[in-house]
Image (tube, rainbow, N blue to C red):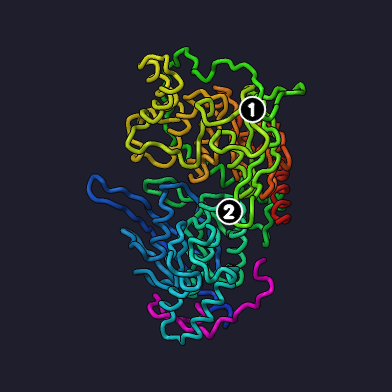
Amino acid sequence: MPNAGLKKQPLPPLAWPPGMATEPSLTMVKAELLPRAAPLSPMLELRGAGKSFGAGRTRSRVLHDINLQVRDGEFLAIVGYSGSGKSTLISLLAGLQPADTGEVLKLGAPITGPGPDRGVVFQSYSLMPWLTVTENIALAVDAAFARESRALRRERVLRYIDLVNLTPASAKRPAELSGGMRQRVAVARALAANPDVLLLDEPLSALDALTRANLQDELVRIWGEERKTVVLITNDVDEGLLLADRIIPLTPGPGATLGPEFIVDLPRPRDRQASNHDPRFIALRKAVTEYLLEVGGQQTRAPCALNELPTLRPVTAREMQPIGTAHHITPTDKTPRYVDFSHVSKVYPGPRGPITVVDKFDLQITKGEFVSIIGHSGCGKSTVLSMAAGLTPTNGGGIVLDFQEITGAGPDRGLVFQSPSLIPWLSAFENVALGVAQVYPHASAGERQDIAEHYLTRVGLREALHKRAFELSKGMQQRVGIARAFALQPKLLLLDEPFGMLDALTRWELQEVLMEVWSSNQLTAICVTHDIDEALLLADRVVMMTNGPNARVGRILNVDLPRPRTRRALLDHADYYRLREELLTFLAGCDQAN
């Protein structure tokens, strides 16, 4: 812990900020002064609440007949998919938007607007970029406790900076902080107004796995110390199980409503590794996931008929003769090496001298194999993929694809990034057709059209062929990126966290799409991910990288699970949690090494 030697600043005597929805009572007094008495009314309540947007024919009903009670001091998780109305629900509880129907209450009194008694943390940090950490948090304290002396307000600011372990960074501005540190500032700012309720709207979804896990632990610690009532919006089932007392799904919209509640009766503190072989955790995880898959499946469109592909070979499929390479890489054993990383290293300049990010990375991949690479943020996963794509040169060793050394980018490698990098003013069809024209110059216009339409249909975009990229959702844009990569019929498919920015339902759907199209094409694929469940679902082997700098292959796990795979089937497979445990153990060891 960065602040292990620091002493916590005691909170000054409590002063209730002006503008609270109700006058303070014994039920609202903070834990540092008096124990809480059980309130006569729930801390938060929604009675038949609904919310719509627009008017007339364009009116869209987002939430319908929401009935919910949140107890004082409870940690509640609401899980659901993008577009289901999760953020709208938080806005109702925060008083940022009024309900069209029903009631929204706090301690039995109507919520009529925002107030410092409800702290809100959104997915985006919303910090003032020109202010320091201290100054950003002081904004909330000065607004909520304007009647207090400057010294008392300063004590409050310091206490909450320390609470989220940011004292060493207190003079830094947001641009100088990592994403995880910025989100800690947002949490501290919300807590600094001393609210009864903390409303968290997917605050960790944009963070890497290690930072997310660390902040999850911080939230549980803060919740325990501060005795807040917490409502967390998330699309991560594991996050809900690790943090919450109850999980309640929100059904997909329009007109979303609450599904059945799941009581998370797991003992605290909850350990990720221990939970992985806890029968109750496994049963709860399966129940929540299967419910989400069931309600999500009701939204899936019927498959469209596929047009036949023309019998053409892309120019990248022409046979290459083995050639000598600058690094003398030749297959010397009996293992077929379709892709060969041999002692690959990458060095970047640093303020104190060169930094070896990747050091002697060795990996051989057979033709048609699907390999996942996992590791913590900064371990060089994306650097390895970028070198394989020819976008970044190596500083040592070399990479061979089909007996040809990679010395630059080329259409024989299809790339799908976290952001699909589409040309926004072109349609989905035109974005794919651009790539098709490069690898099928010998094809007729009709044949190229058939190829582009075939793969767009395969990824479920038959009805959106001629929509421009900026008109598509993030999930649909990523489908275009996948279709474009497969339409090139590349020798090597490279996927750099392709689903990292998507909600759970969209991510699950696109994983299924990817597996289906990959299995029918039998392309050789490398997928960088921080999601161990995604790695196990997709891969034949999982390559675990050590932490950087000087990152390299730490261990390789053979995933001997039967294909075709589905998420539902994996939950019931006897070996799934054993394999998951091996990945969790490796990553935990990397944490401790830091």
SS at mark 1? strand
Q: Position of residue 535 (x, y in %)?
A: 62, 39
Task: Determine the main secondary structure of the stretch shown in magenta.
Answer: loop
- Mark sitting on residue 355: none
For the point 47% across and 84% down, which residue is it?
15
Extreme residue toward the bottom, this view: 149
Disc 1 marks a residue whose amino acid type is: Val
SS at mark 2? helix
For the point 51% across and 81% down, which residue is it?
154
- The image shows a total of numbered marks equal to 2
Dot 1 alpha-carbon crowd within 10 angstroms: few under 14, some 14 to 19, many 20 or more:
many
Magenta range is 1-29
Q: Position of residue 99 (x, y in %)?
A: 34, 60
Residue 170 drawn above or below residue 593: below
Q: Is 56 positioned to the left or the right of 367 in the image?
A: left
- Residue under pointer 1: 400
Q: Nearer the viewer, mark 2 or mark 1?
A: 1
Residue 228 appearing in the image? yes
Dot 2 alpha-carbon crowd within 10 angstroms: few under 14, some 14 to 19, many 20 or more:
some
Instruction: Work out whether residue 136 or residue 347 is closer to the camera in this orientation and state it.
Output: 347
Q: Is 500 positioned to the left or the right of 6 in the image?
A: left
Q: Position of residue 377 (x, y in %)?
A: 61, 50
